[in-house]
Image (cartoon, rainbow, N blue to C red):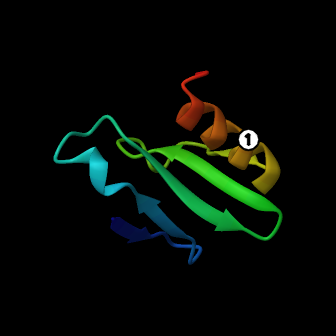
Amino acid sequence: MMINIDDTGRVWRKASYSGAGQNCVEVAMLPAGLAIRDSKNPDMPFLQVSAAAFAEFIGSIREGSV
């Protein structure tokens, strides 16, 4: 897992499965959920989702529904 810390102190994590490629997303914990951003454009706005919504999304990926 690769870790980046931005100017606000958010700790962004990129999955180790991402490899050396630049087509990845990063995830950071927020007080009310998670932030998701494009790793090649870290200064762009991020998507904020609830922890429950993110867990449901990950579950759908594991099931092959997405």
Report the residue at 56% width, 78% height from top.
9
Q: Is residue 22 left or right of residue 7?
A: left
| Callout 1 crowding tier (Cα within 10 Å): few <14, some 14–19, many ≥20 | few
Q: In this view, does 21 lie to the left or right of 65?
A: left
Q: In this view, does 58 lie above or below 12?
A: above
Q: Is residue 6 left or right of residue 54?
A: left
Residue farthest toward the left in the current orientation of the protein: 20
Q: Is residue 23 above or below residue 51?
A: above
Quadrant for residue 46, please give it.
top right
Between 27 and 39, the residue placed more toward the observer is 27
Q: Quadrant of the N terminus?
A: bottom left
Q: Where is residue 12 in the image (x, y as percent from the top left)?
A: 48, 64
Q: Where is residue 24 in the image (x, y as percent from the top left)?
A: 37, 40
Q: Where is residue 13 in the image (x, y as percent from the top left)?
A: 44, 62
Between 59 and 47, the residue placed more toward the observer is 59
Between 42 and 56, the residue placed more toward the observer is 56
Q: In which quarter of the image is the C terminus?
A: top right
Q: Mark 1 points at which residue?
A: 56
**Residue type of the residue flagged with mark 1:** Glu
Report the residue at 65% width, 66% height from top.
29
Quadrant for residue 40, please give it.
top left
Residue farthest toward the top in the current orientation of the protein: 65
Q: Position of residue 64 (x, y in %)?
A: 54, 25
Q: Is residue 60 above or below residue 10?
A: above
Between 23 and 44, the residue placed more toward the observer is 23
**Count of numbered labels shown in the rendering:** 1
Residue farthest toward the front in the current orientation of the protein: 63
Report the residue at 77% width, 55% height from top.
51
Q: Is mark 1 on a helix, strand or loop?
A: helix
